[in-house]
Image (cartoon, helix red, strand yellow):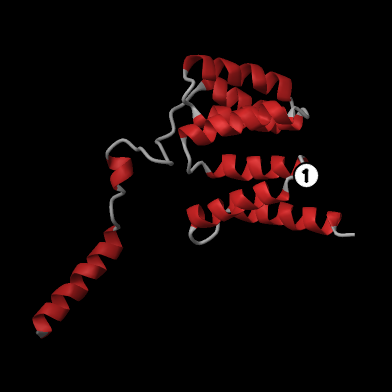
Amino acid sequence: MRIIAISLYMFLVLLFTIGVPNPAFASGGGGSAPEKQSDSDLDRATQAIKAKEYERAISYLNAVVARDDRNAEAHNLLGFSERMRGNLDVAFKHYERALAIDPKHRGAHEYVGETYLLAGNLPKAEEHLVILDKLCFFSCEEYRDLKAAIAAYRAKHQQ
């Protein structure tokens, strides 16, 4: 019995020392965290968004989705850019498309929740917060950001 316990202990030490390989990464990805492929238009769009140049970002992102309409991140960023320009209806369409492609896309859940707040729809924003709570397990930035936005919305509209 003692030999088994020592063997198990040694196995666990070895396992935690060398780590466990990530099967999704080893097999080429899949699910909600695919291996990131470089796309210069997507990179340019991200830089344009950081510079708050949403028109320019949209042109790059449109080029990305013209090549690959199943790019959830491009649709998510299109939604964000359109939201920042005040085009909520167009933003919602892109978030819906991103979530249809990848229902676990945390960024799209956060951004669509924030967009629902701009549209005055607190219950829909809260639905996405619940989804993020399930997706994030131990919390994540997207969950915390949407939760803070909902709290700010409630504080502002409590009169």
Q: In this rendering, would 144 be left or right of 10?
A: right
Q: Is residue 149 left or right of residue 7?
A: right
Left or right, 62 with reference to 83: left
Image quadrant where one finds the N terminus: bottom left
**Tag 1: Cα neighbours inside 10 Å, few (<14), some, or many (≥20)?**
few
Quadrant, the C terminus? bottom right
Residue sticking out furthest to the right:
159
Residue name at image x 85 percent, y 55 percent: 156
Task: Tell me the SS state at disc 1.
Answer: loop
Residue 46 appears in view: no
Tell me the kind of residue under disc 1: Gly
Toward the viewer: 3 or 117? Answer: 117
- x and y, in percent, of residue 106 in the image: 54, 45
**Coordinates of residue 36 in the picture (x, y in percent):** 44, 33
Q: Residue 76's image quarter?
A: top right
Above/below status of 52 relative to 157: above
Given residues 34 and 48, the one toward you in this image is 34
Name the one closer to the observer, 144 or 9. 144
Q: Can residue 147 be seen by looking at this rendering?
A: yes
Q: Residue 89: image x %, image y %?
A: 70, 28
